[in-house]
Image (cartoon, rainbow, N blue to C red):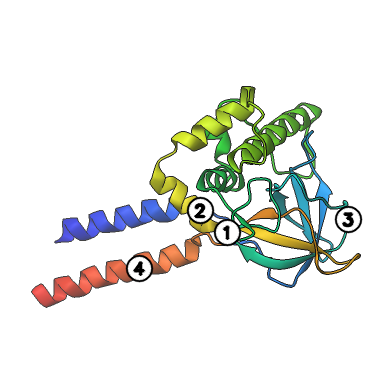
Amino acid sequence: MKKKTLMMSMMLMIVMLAAPFVYADSINVGDTIQLYNSYGETPGGAFSLYKDSTYQFESFCLEMNEYFTFGENLIVAGITKGAVNGGVGGGTDGVDPLDDRTAYLYYNFRMNTLASLVSGFSYVFAPSISSTQETLNRTSATALQQAIWYLEEETTAPLSGLALSLWTVANNAPLAARTTAYNNVGVLNLQGSNVGYGVNRQDQLTITSVPEPATMLLLGLGLIGLAGVRRKYKA
């Protein structure tokens, strides 16, 4: 029994160490945010998202037929699993569903693991980077936005180079990995505030939930405790 308890403890420690040290984004329905150009050469992302004059995270848009102005006050009208009232590849109910492959790419982008999955992808989250890394950020962000638009059926233009590599990795990703990503990624349904609340803006990707290390630790300690109780009852 000691060996089983020890093995369980070791496995739980591995899970805790592997847990991403990134939590859900602090964005809620009704919040006012701003988007600024970060890197990328398309009309899309990467975009730097700010709330209360504080940088939050990098995001990418899902729609090619809606727009916004950098620095414009945008209202978070909803946080859903799809682009609302927009999107070339929209659904029949006015919602263009989020593709789990898009979620997979963005989830790994935010977890800083996309570079390990796609050769040639390099994006550094830092306020100050070298000119070489700026070029890599720009190339990678452009390719990721192109892959997202293709997956969301916003464009049928053939992908090539890094964008094609990103699509291929997402398309071949295990269903379980795509499902995990989908469950942790959401869509910020944005509307303009300076020309009327009902004017839609490009919806953006966000992280809605990620297992916290503290939660994993509590779970681990609980399971280890249960193993000890079980052992005591058997003794």
- The Cα–Cα distance between marks 2 and 1, rounded to whole angstroms, is 9 Å
What amino acid does circle 2 point to? Tyr
State if disc 1 and disc 3 touch (CB < 8 Å).
no
Q: CA distance from mark 2 to mark 4?
A: 28 Å
Q: Residue at x 75, y 70 (%)?
A: 31
Tell me how far mark 3 sits from mark 1, CA to CA.
25 Å
Q: Position of residue 68 (x, y in %)?
A: 84, 53
Element on which disc 2 rests: helix
Mark 2 near mark 1, Cβ–Cβ under 8 Å? yes
User: Amino acid under label 1?
Assistant: Lys
> 133 and 149: which one is in front?
149
Q: Nearer the viewer, residue 233 or 29?
A: 29
- Find disc 1 in the rendering and name its residue: 81
For the residues labelled 3 and 2, the Cα–Cα distance comes to: 29 Å
Secondary structure category for the residue under label 3: loop
What residue is shown at x 76% (from left), y 42% (from top)? 44
Residue kind at label 4, given as amino acid type:
Leu
